[in-house]
């Protein structure tokens, strides 16, 4: 893996260090547990990272946080991160290719097709979002390495910065605590083959390691959609005295044929056909992260992450070759600690985030190169005002420096703040109120494709208000959140705007003000000792407030979603599971004036069975049990509308052995 890190820009000056340690900006944490299975609370001792950016026993802080544990993932029989996220409330999944990996994106809080740049996706705190319009690669995450999935619903701009306007998803990978070797092999629909292997060991001298590999081969359900994929992950840990080191290395190779979109007539004639039989996209990704944690004393820790990701994607679109290269490097030092007070622990996080990104792409119209850098100083403080009251407050100051070969250079700053309060009404009931400000910087390639009269796009900014309730009623755990998100200068591609190629040829623009408001309800029920049920319901009203599209709904946002899952432990060795998710009707992407027919709503059911016999386990799963025919993505307006049909019924069986 090449090393491409601008160390000269990452050296922290004494003034910055003084600010980090002595003058923390007062910032918010954000947490309210809402796990899908109450029994999973015991796993990992309630440890979570997403609320404070350091491992803590999950505190009760004002925000909606959901944690999905390894045993819940195993029980569902899910084979990919997309399959796990698809049944969780408050998230809308779009899969333009249909293989549950590349081409899939996550939207939250009514952002629709803009969700890829407004939901922050992390792996152990390492950012997967790109400095461009390209969405994070969900295919780069192998579930065999995942310990838990932490989801912060709602804005988190103060704590996480750019692109955290709608929410944050942090994938926590495993660190060895025992010696184990695991081998798996499976077959499935469309000539799918999957092979996995892992070995891990924790040694007595503080040294540990984990090696894991995954290989997937599949034709997939559409023509010209063959895939050849592998993922190799290595983790090395060392704990010596008060210092803990962790090194993660990952290599992903994903060679994928691209079937393209279909017209309505093509879709109705044959949903599996391809409109682009020569298109493909081969992606090579190398990533590394070095994490350091030093215990200064019993209550204070100094942490730092140094990470880098190199992506190289090349292929052909409509028989025209393309290539896209990007390198993202980040340095994230931070101080985390607590102070005992009369009413509980005061929690503090303060730190500095710096990210350097370079990219170069060529889609046949000439090479475009750009680089950008963000420098952020932030802090977070949680204060127990009384035995049952917590207040959180904080802020972030962010700077963007960007330039590209179109000579539109950017040097801009902004500041966001947040404030939250929560009260533990009883041992089983709690309410919280939170106000957070979010933002998204325009990417360099967005600024490179604007109207001739626009020098550069404005940063997108938002204000989020949330009111939530957590309750426990014997076997029922319930979380309900109502929210309102006011958005200004949303960055958006308008295909009909006056652009670089002339009037009506399309350009990136700042939209007029818009509002997202709604509520989410989720819960889980323990039914006797062998049944477990989780459920969710989400409603969102996303509309433009002013301008040409005033009072129109945001395209590709389903107003209503509902779903749930039921598991039955038939015996100590056999678990059966079924889940379902309803997604309501939506306007097609690009239909900003809501003048065309909507995409219809649909309901999809999945089922799985897991058999554990000593060291042997067998997993069978069926996706789209009812063979529902629906479109996961659609854009344009008739007669120029286009469709990406979702896969029908698919099955997979995996057999594994652990030693």
Image (cartoon, rainbow, N blue to C red):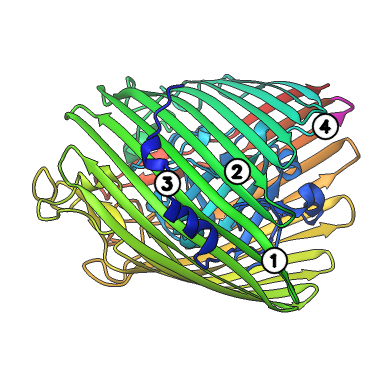
Q: Which residue is mark 1?
A: 339
Q: Position of residue 43 (x, y in %)?
A: 79, 48
Label annotation for residue 611: 4
Q: Nearer the viewer, residue 589 or 194?
A: 194
CA separation in Å, label 2 and label 3: 21 Å
Q: Residues within 10 Å of mark 1 (few under 14, many from 20)?
A: few
Q: How far is disc 4 from disc 1 in space, using C-alphas?
A: 47 Å
Closer to the observer: label 4 or label 3?
Answer: 3
Label 2: state its secondary structure.
strand
**What separation in Å lies between label 1 and label 3 (alpha carbons)?**
28 Å
Query: Which is more toward the observer, 153 or 303?
Result: 303
Tag 3 or tag 2, which sits nearer the N-term? 2
* 1 vs 2, front mark: 1
Specify the quadrant that holds the C terminus: top right
Q: Which quadrant of the view contains residue 467? A: bottom right
**CA separation in Å, label 4 and label 2:** 26 Å
Q: Main secondary structure of the magenta part?
A: strand
Q: CA distance from mark 4 to mark 3?
A: 47 Å
Magenta span covers which residues?
611-615
């Amino acid at each position: 893996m090449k090393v491409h890190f601008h160390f000269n820009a990452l050296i922290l000056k004494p003034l910055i260090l003084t600010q980090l340690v002595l003058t923390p900006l007062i910032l918010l944490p954000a947490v309210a547990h809402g796990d899908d299975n109450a029994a999973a609370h015991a796993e990992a001792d309630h440890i979570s990272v997403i609320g404070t950016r350091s491992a803590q026993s999950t505190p009760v802080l004002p925000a909606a946080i959901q944690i999905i544990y390894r045993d819940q993932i195993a029980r569902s029989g899910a084979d990919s991160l997309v399959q796990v996220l698809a049944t969780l409330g408050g998230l809308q999944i779009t899969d333009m290719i249909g293989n549950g990996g590349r081409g899939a994106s996550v939207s939250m809080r009514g952002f629709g097709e803009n969700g890829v740049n407004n939901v922050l996706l992390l792996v152990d705190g390492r950012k997967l979002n790109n400095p461009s319009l390209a969405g994070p690669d969900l295919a780069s995450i192998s579930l065999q390495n995942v310990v838990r999935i932490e989801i912060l619903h709602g804005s988190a701009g103060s704590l996480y910065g750019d692109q955290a306007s709608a929410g944050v998803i942090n994938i926590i990978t495993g660190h060895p605590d025992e010696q184990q070797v695991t081998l798996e092999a499976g077959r499935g629909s469309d000539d799918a083959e999957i092979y996995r292997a892992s070995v891990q060991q924790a040694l007595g001298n503080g040294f540990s390691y984990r090696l894991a590999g995954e290989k997937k081969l599949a034709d997939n359900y559409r023509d010209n959609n063959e895939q050849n994929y592998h993922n190799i992950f290595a983790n090395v840990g060392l704990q010596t005295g008060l210092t803990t080191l962790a090194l993660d290395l990952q290599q992903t190779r994903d060679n994928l044929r691209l079937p393209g979109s279909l017209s309505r007539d093509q879709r109705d004639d044959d949903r599996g056909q391809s409109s682009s039989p020569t298109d493909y996209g081969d992606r090579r990704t190398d990533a590394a992260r070095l994490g350091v944690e030093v215990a200064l004393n019993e209550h204070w820790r100094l942490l730092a992450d140094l990470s880098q990701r190199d992506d190289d994607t090349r292929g052909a679109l409509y028989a025209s070759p393309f290539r896209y290269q990007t390198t993202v490097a980040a340095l994230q030092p931070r101080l985390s600690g607590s102070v005992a007070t009369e009413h509980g622990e005061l929690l503090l996080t303060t730190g500095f985030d710096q990210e350097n990104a370079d990219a170069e792409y060529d889609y046949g119209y000439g090479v475009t190169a750009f680089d950008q850098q963000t420098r952020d100083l932030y802090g977070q403080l949680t204060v127990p005002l009384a035995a049952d009251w917590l207040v959180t407050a904080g802020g972030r100051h962010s700077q963007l420096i960007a330039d590209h070969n179109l000579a539109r250079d950017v040097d801009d700053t902004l500041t966001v703040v947040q404030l939250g309060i929560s009260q533990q009404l009883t041992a089983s009931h709690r309410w919280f109120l939170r106000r957070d400000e979010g933002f998204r910087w325009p990417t360099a390639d967005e600024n490179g494709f604007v109207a001739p009269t626009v020098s550069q796009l404005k940063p997108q900014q938002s204000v989020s208000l949330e009111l939530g309730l957590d309750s426990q009623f014997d076997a029922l755990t319930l979380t309900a959140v109502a929210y309102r998100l006011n958005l200004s200068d949303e960055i958006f591609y308008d295909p009909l705007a006056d652009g670089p190629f002339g009037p009506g040829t399309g350009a990136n623009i700042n939209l007029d003000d818009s509002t997202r408001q709604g509520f989410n309800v989720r819960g889980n029920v323990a039914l006797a000792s062998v049944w477990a049920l989780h459920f969710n319901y989400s409603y969102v009203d996303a509309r433009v407030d002013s301008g040409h599209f005033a009072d129109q709904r945001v395209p590709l946002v389903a107003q209503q979603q509902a779903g749930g899952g039921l598991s039955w432990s038939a015996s100590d060795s056999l678990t059966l599971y079924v889940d379902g998710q309803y997604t309501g009707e939506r306007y097609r992407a690009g239909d900003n004036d809501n003048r065309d027919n909507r995409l219809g709503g649909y309901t999809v059911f999945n089922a799985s069975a897991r058999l554990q016999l000593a060291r042997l386990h067998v997993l069978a799963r069926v996706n789209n049990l009812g063979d529902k025919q629906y479109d996961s993505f659609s854009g344009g307006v008739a007669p120029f509308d286009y469709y990406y049909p979702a896969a029908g019924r698919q099955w997979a069986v995996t057999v594994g052995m652990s030693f």
